[in-house]
Image (spheres, grey):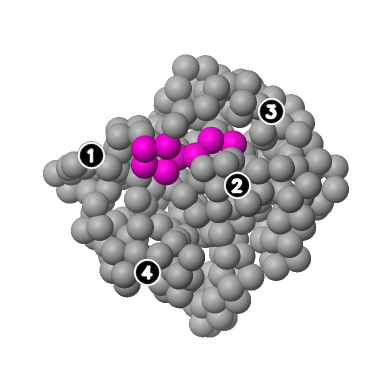
Amino acid sequence: MPPVNAPQVMGILNVTPDSFSDGGHFFHKDSALKQAHKMLEEGAEIIDIGGESTRPGAQAVSLQQELDRVIPVVEKIRAEFPISISVDTSKAQVMSEAIAVGADMINDVMALRAEGSLAAVAASETVQVCLMHIQGEPRTMQNNPHYDDVVNDIKTFLLERVQACLEAGIASNRLLIDPGFGFGKTVAHNLHLMQRLEVLTELDYPVLVGVSRKSLIGHILNKTVTERLYGGLALAVLAVSKGARVIRTHDVGATVDALKMTHAVLQL
């Protein structure tokens, strides 16, 4: 068996007042920079900066609000830390301005479907993009989601978005895909998706998985948001064992350790 590449850990940095897990903790630039430094020291290879909460029922923010939250943090981290920077946004102008000040990746829960977003990413020759599956949109996504076959439906959607990117001139080696755990999916959908994750990881694109502190864990374990570390680590290890290449998490240090142990076994 050929060697298995080590998975990457993406640390979550929400510069928002209302994200489901850490809303308000890193809203100000100084606290955001301290958290970025902490995640870098703990072993994160990517920091994912988000200026608009995508939790169910979250309120939308204006373009200017999101720019004001995100761009100064990207600039500062780019200047101070040797780390890959991802920006979690669906707005084309935020994408363009983030890329201009040094972002390396765009992480879009809407998979570049918003007006102008495909062009914004295609205008760069190097920036990566993660295309995520969502059913509906963040404000309403948990209103009775339904699938004929959750895994195959997600696969079809993601391959359609990949094709749109390729046709827009975005090279295939710049693309990642994310099945979107918790985004328009019931607990049963999420469990089936994890069980059959190989259907996606066997495609030609690296799979990013984000399950950190999500309600799936709370439902199964009856734990509050701040008590979901161990359940999240179990899911992260499962995801990597099934071929996921990037794990997005709030808990960088613990996740790095868990995945180093997993990788030590998988690479034998």
Kind of element beneath mark 1 = loop
Q: Mark 2 belongs to which amino acid?
A: Gly
Q: Mark 4 sits on what residue?
A: 223
Highlighted range, magenta:
48-58
Q: Mark 1 belongs to which amino acid?
A: Asn
- Please check the rendered image and state whether residue 52 is part of the magenta-colored stretch, yes or no: yes
Residue 6 in view, yes or no: no
Q: Mark 3 sits on what residue?
A: 68
Q: Would you call the spot at circle 4 few (<14 residues within 10 Å), some (14-19), or many (20 or more)?
A: some
Observer-side mark, 3 or 2, equals 2
Q: Mark 1 sits on what residue?
A: 143
Q: Earlier in the sequence, mark 4 or mark 3?
A: 3
Q: Position of residue 82 (x, y in %)?
A: 80, 52
Q: Would you call the spot at circle 2 few (<14 residues within 10 Å), some (14-19), or many (20 or more)?
A: some
Q: Would you call the spot at circle 1 few (<14 residues within 10 Å), some (14-19), or many (20 or more)?
A: few
Seen in the picture, residue 65 relative to 221 is either above or below; the reply is above
Q: Earlier in the sequence, mark 1 or mark 2?
A: 2
Of residues 82 and 33, the one nearer the viewer is 33
Q: Would you call the spot at circle 3 few (<14 residues within 10 Å), some (14-19), or many (20 or more)?
A: few
Residue 24: mark? 2
